[in-house]
Image (tube, rainbow, N blue to C red):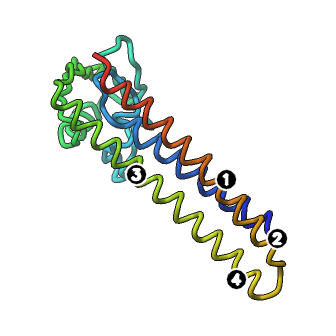
Amino acid sequence: MIKDIINDAEERMKKSVEHLSKDLASLRAGRANPAMVEKLTVEYYGVNTPINQLANITVPEARLLVIQPWDKSIIADIEKSIMKSDLGITPSNDGNVIRIAIPQLTEERRKELVKVVKKRAEEARVAVRNIRREANDMLKSSEKDKLISADESKKGVDEVQKLTDRYVKKIDTVLQAKEKEIMEV
């Protein structure tokens, strides 16, 4: 019973950290990264389809992203999707591939991005703490329903706290890595 609650909490905390990592990968840090455009969608035969399912996305240079669609007829649609996005970059195409030059970030823009990254990391920490609270509530209700003893409940709460501390540290590690990447000139 206690093990199930703790395993469920750990699984959900792990997903929170993974979500944060994916979320931060899509942030532009002055360096080309395929994750920047992967979440963008293009209408293809009436269905909104992610760009990574319609094209090959490569990074030939540190500041260049190349999107090579398998179907050349959707180049204009992919280009429109990139222009509409919040990336703030302008693509160029030669009829076969779309090239996206990633400009150098200004110091001001870097600081704004760091604020965004910290906000998203705090949201992940809050999610982990909410999972801790739910797990603790489940343990306390199990104790109240006489399914587990008070000692077992206390041990479970301690284990959930250790789990929470471990995942908050992982979030901090992801945050520091992204912060360092953004502030790197």
Mark nearer the N terminus (4 vs 2): 4
Q: Residue at left 75%, top 65%? A: 156
Q: Could you tell me the amino acid type at mark 2? A: Glu
Q: Which residue is mark 3?
A: 122
Q: Which residue is mark 1?
A: 162
Mark nearer the N terminus (3 vs 1): 3
Q: Are marks 4 and 2 in contact (CB under 8 Å)?
A: no
**The label number, if any, that marks residue 141 in the structure image:** 4
Give whichever of 57, 141 is nearer the camera. 141
Mark nearer the N terminus (1 vs 2): 2
Q: Which residue is mark 2?
A: 152
Q: Could you tell me the amino acid type at mark 1? A: Lys
Q: Residue at left 66%, top 53%? A: 163
Q: Residue at left 18%, top 37%? A: 83
Q: Are marks 2 and 3 in contact (CB under 8 Å)?
A: no
* Eye-nearest disc, 4 or 2: 2
Calculate the distance from the C-alpha at mark 4 to the C-alpha at mark 2: 12 Å
Calculate the distance from the C-alpha at mark 3 to the C-alpha at mark 1: 19 Å
Calculate the distance from the C-alpha at mark 2 to the C-alpha at mark 3: 31 Å
Relative vertical location of residue 175 with respect to residue 160 in this rendering, above or below: above
Relative vertical location of residue 74 with respect to residue 96 in this rendering, above or below: below
Calculate the distance from the C-alpha at mark 4 to the C-alpha at mark 3: 28 Å
* Eye-nearest disc, 2 or 3: 2
Q: Are marks 3 and 1 in contact (CB under 8 Å)?
A: no
Q: Could you tell me the amino acid type at mark 3? A: Glu
Q: Secondary structure at mark 4?
A: helix
Q: Secondary structure at mark 1?
A: helix
Query: Which of the 4 image quarters holds residue 133?
Result: bottom right
Judge left or right: residue 30 versus residue 120: left
Category of crowding for the residue at label 1, using alpha-carbon neighbours closer than 10 angstroms: few (below 14), some (14–19), many (at least 20) = few
- Is the C terminus in the top left, top right, bottom left or bottom right quadrant? top left
Calculate the distance from the C-alpha at mark 4 to the C-alpha at mark 1: 20 Å
